[in-house]
Amino acid sequence: MIKLENVSKAYTAGIPALNDVNLYIEPGEFVFVVGDSGSGKSTLIKLLLKELEPTSGSIVINNQKLGSIRHRDVPRFRRNVGVVFQDFRLLKDRNVYENVAFAQRVVGTPVKKIRRKVPAVLSMVGLAAKYKSYPREISGGEQQRVAIARALVNEPKILLADEPTGNLDAHNAWEIMKLLDEINQRGTTVLVVTHNLDIVKAMKKRVITMKKGVVVDDEQAGDSYED
Amino acid sequence: MRISTFLYTLRQGAKNIWKNKMFSLASIATMSACIFLFGVFYAVVVNFQSVVKEVESGVAVTVFFNDGATQEQIDEIGVQIKKRVEVSESVFVSAEAAWQEFQKVYFEGSEEMAQGFADDNPLVNSSHYEVYMNDISMQESLVSYLQSLDGVKEIKSSDLAANTLTDFNRLIGYVSAGIILILLCVAVFLISNTVTIGIAVRREEIAIMKLIGATDYFVRAPFIVEGILIGIIGSALPLTVLYFMYRRIIFSVAEKFRWLSGMLEFLPVEKVFSTLVPVGLILGVGIGFLGSRLTIRKHLKV
């Protein structure tokens, strides 16, 4: 569950990046956040990851009020929120297996469990055969699959995807969206920030539109979204 | 902490060193130079101090008794002297022994002149204690104590010798501490630079680690390990070189400069290195730890 109440964020004095945003996302929902550059989408993702603190308002994720999480408890909170970026952010000197295993090592998962879990999640994203490949040896779509596998391997309740298809061609973009949909079908709440309106229209999911830091539209799943 | 996490941290620390080969090498070389100089300095200082100690041990305070002091009083004074912690040894010299010694020194070659005093010891009131000290800097307090004892007439001591040796010892202490401090600061600075580069190189990896829920400790530990490893390598290398060098030098000096024996006695290898090795390693590890810890605090906000 994600809940924002009167959330504002201003970097400097002047126009706030987010202005009095109210949002409620149910557990297991699939939500698109769309908007032009500077609309506040990335700020929203950063606030949800507790990379930034809101200037005012409160954010609750999985029944945890972000404002009351102490600095030393932030890592534990982030383990329940997977994140995927436009530029994949893979470790270039490690192969596919090691990139995914890294997420488990970071949280202190026992080696035995890593050996069992990583092949399973790679298989889920369709990369079981490429576990030895390095990021430079696979396509952009495949790199994004590795990033998704890494985000999912710790079984987070929420998956945040910041422009996950931004660097991909139409075919790969569609494949990634289908994968995210599958993940959502398994019960994970998915929030996707994107510019790709064709995909947004085709997916028929809830769409939140932002403009200059304000939520200007919130179309429920199944409504026909028109830009 | 899990063993697997501990091993992973160790591996990452070692990998950091390998990834930044040139900077790591520079740090190890500087650390080695510092520990090497520290070792050379230490070896010179302890040998020098041993020579000074040898000289100090020959400096004595002479305690004379009141005229007509009984043997009982003299013995009591001897007991009081031996109770003092700063006293390493006290030797009673009777009037006869003092006269014998005087003759040896001043009538050598013209012993017949001393025959004039055959039955009349001119030093009849010169029986005394020669008091040797553990630490010559405590001479002043010892002398004032001795003066307070009943039956003591006079104390003879060489303030000049005591003060010179004490000042000299102090100077050596200050100079060595100063030089060692400078060397340590240089080493900490260089390790800090290496770790800074390591952090810059791994900035992306660190950002990813933070986003997927790594604890501060997990992010920081490999850099601490890196600093400590540089410290261990950078101190073990020069200590090994120094060990063989020192052995070689004392062997060569003993072989080629035999005429020096008696004047210049080197401390044995075991005695110097039983302290130098642990101190050098602790310094190396400490500098490595400190250098990386300070850098992480400054550059790695997690």
Image: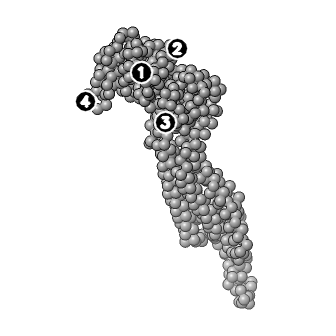
Mark 3 vs mark 2, foreground winner is 2
How far apart are labels 3 and 2 at the CA level? 30 Å
Q: Which mark is residue B68?
A: none
Task: Where is residue B7? Give x, y as percent.
Answer: 63, 36
Q: Is residue A77 visible?
A: no
Q: Circle 4 sits on which residue?
A: A14
Q: Amino acid at mark 3?
A: Ile
Q: Circle 2 sits on which residue?
A: A186
Rendered image quadrant of residue B96: bottom right
Badge 2 crowding class, 10 Å Cα cut-off, few under 14, some 14 to 19, many 20 or more, is few
Q: Amino acid at mark 4?
A: Gly
Residue appearing at x 45%, y 18% in the figure: A190
- Say whether disc 2 or disc 4 marks the residue closer to the N-terminus: 4
Q: Amino acid at mark 2?
A: Arg
Q: Circle 1 sits on which residue?
A: A192
- Work out whether residue B171 or residue B289 is closer to the camera in this orientation and state it: B289
- Work out whether residue B15 or residue B61 is closer to the camera in this orientation and state it: B15
Mark 1 vs mark 3, foreground winner is 1
**Residue, far left:** A14
Secondary structure beneath dot 2 equals loop
- Say whether disc 4 or disc 1 marks the residue closer to the N-terminus: 4
Badge 1 crowding class, 10 Å Cα cut-off, few under 14, some 14 to 19, many 20 or more, is many
How far apart are labels 2 and 4 at the CA level? 42 Å
- Say whether disc 1 or disc 2 marks the residue closer to the N-terminus: 2
Q: Amino acid at mark 1?
A: Val
Residue appearing at x 69%, y 59% in the figure: B271
Secondary structure beneath dot 4 equals loop
